[in-house]
Image (cartoon, rainbow, N blue to C red):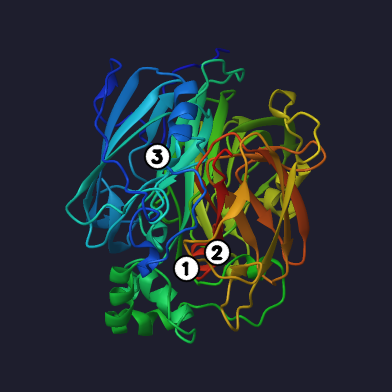
Amino acid sequence: MRTHSRRAVLGAGLAAAGSGLLAPRSLASTAPDTRHGGGAPHGRDDRPPSGYVSPSGAEVAETEGERGNGPVRAFSLTASETRLDLGGVIVDTWAYGDRLPGQPIRVTAGERIALTLRNRLPQSTTIHWHGLQLRNDMDGVPGITQREVRPGDSFNYLFAASTPGTHWLHPHVGVQVDRGLYAPLIVDDPEEALSYDKEWIIVIDDWLDGVDGVTPDAILAELNKDKPGGPMGHGELQMAHRSDRRSRDAASRMLMNMARMDDDDFSGTVEHPYHLINGKTRYDRETFRAKPGDRIRIRIINASGDTAYRVALGDHQLTVTHTDGFPVAHHKTDSLLIGMAERYDVLVTAKDGVFPFTALSAGKNNQTAQALLRTGSGDAPDPKIRPKELRSGGISAGDLKGDESCLLDDREPDRTIKMNLTGTMEKWNWAINGKPYTPSQRYPVEQGERVRIVFRNKTKMWHPMHLHGHTFALPDGGPRKDTTIMLPGKKLAVDFDADNPGLWMMHCHNIYHSESGMMTVLGYRLPK
């Protein structure tokens, strides 16, 4: 058994994109304009309050300098309209580099990522580096940390990658993440303790874009059609909402029945007709090949816009080793429950045969995505098969304990922020503390504080809550996370250290909830 540092990656085509490792150098980056929060956010001209650290301020630069000045690894990424084959289903959509998922970005912790994003879309876009603790002006939130990258323009991202683990990248403009605009982002740990033979990256997604003419923009517009002011979003998105009548008619047929009362049924709202693993439906399954006895690390990313999944590998147990990039006390289970934007790393010891890796949608008529692990001869199982391991229902992050290496020190919070998650499906008035998002919102924190966020879900829906630029600890020795599932009616207190100055989003990662109002901003106060 060998321990990997730079791994030979199989299965998902994971050769690093771009021109490879470069000597340390200065790369000019398009500086975001932060005079008014970085442009006209969400079609408004709100002036944020003064007294907060600027996303490109001296405090941000100083913290970035402390992360080191490692070698630069250069990449390029083009976002464009394209036609994709999802496995017998042909769709017109948007993607990175005409592939789904996009080409993975892979670096070693301590290196710097220099990535040029070229926008060939009909809308503005950005990249958010989900899970990374990075400099604020590279976080990819238009109207807050940078100006959106307009059609035909480019933007140069440059930052230190100091957060090892399984992460991913996606836009932070409107509902673009519910198209094909996402890719794995792997930051290898040079001191990796795990030992394994092979690695398999699995990206799960729900899909509707381009099916019967439907677009995510039309879905959002249909959900928000009865609200004053209509859907949120940039001005050009609002124009798309108004003009896309045919797509909106089709979208109305894809909204789920909102009268059901099972917790699973409320993990999402939109009836996605297909569910994918690594860009393919269960009828055109990716096959990962290994030998019996191989120890395989599986990195699982839920890139869906609106769906939680229960996942299992037929006839195998999973040993959970990480969640959201951070190590946990190893935990064996038959299956996992993974919310939108969460990631889990698991180890399996491969048996002899052909086995289905199945992602079962939580609610949503129990649809499935599937891939295959093949270590020997034999026929592939039926694409509709559901491994018996799924019957356990699956553990989630609350069942895990954080590894000792990443536990926060025992300390009382200096500041407590209460965040009530509010809204109903009938009114579609999603908000935090009853206030829908505006770019001028700030929940103040100060550098060096231990901050406690108390979530209370007062709705009947799931809400995977995500904090940018930081990781928080779940209570009672739980794991470190950047995204946590809030079930209906539940309360949860999480702690984080305010050690990364700037303006940072906190939002639900159900994209149709966040873009309808369930997001806000945590802002670092300027030193007095």
* Front label number (1 vs 3): 3
Depth check: 468 or 350 in front? 468
Distance between the Cα atoms at labels 1 and 3? 39 Å
View extreme (front): residue: 528
Crowding near the residue tagged with mark 2, few <14, some 14–19, many ≥20 C-alpha atoms within 10 Å = some
The amino acid type of the residue labelled 1 equals His
The amino acid type of the residue labelled 3 equals Ser
Q: Earlier in the sequence, mark 1 or mark 3?
A: 3
Distance between the Cα atoms at labels 2 and 3? 44 Å
Q: Are marks 1 and 2 in contact (CB under 8 Å)?
A: yes
x and y percentages locating residue 262 in the rendered image:
72, 72
What residue is disc 2 on? 367
Question: Which type of secondary structure does the marked residue at label 1 adopt?
Answer: loop
What residue is disc 1 on? 272
What residue is disc 3 on? 56
Q: Earlier in the sequence, mark 1 or mark 2?
A: 1
Question: Which type of secondary structure does the marked residue at label 3 adopt?
Answer: loop
x and y percentages locating residue 220 in the rendered image:
43, 73
Residue pictured at 48% horizontal, 51% vertical: 303
Depth check: 352 or 290 in front? 290
Residue 286 numbered tag: none
Residue pictured at 47% horizontal, 85% vertical: 228
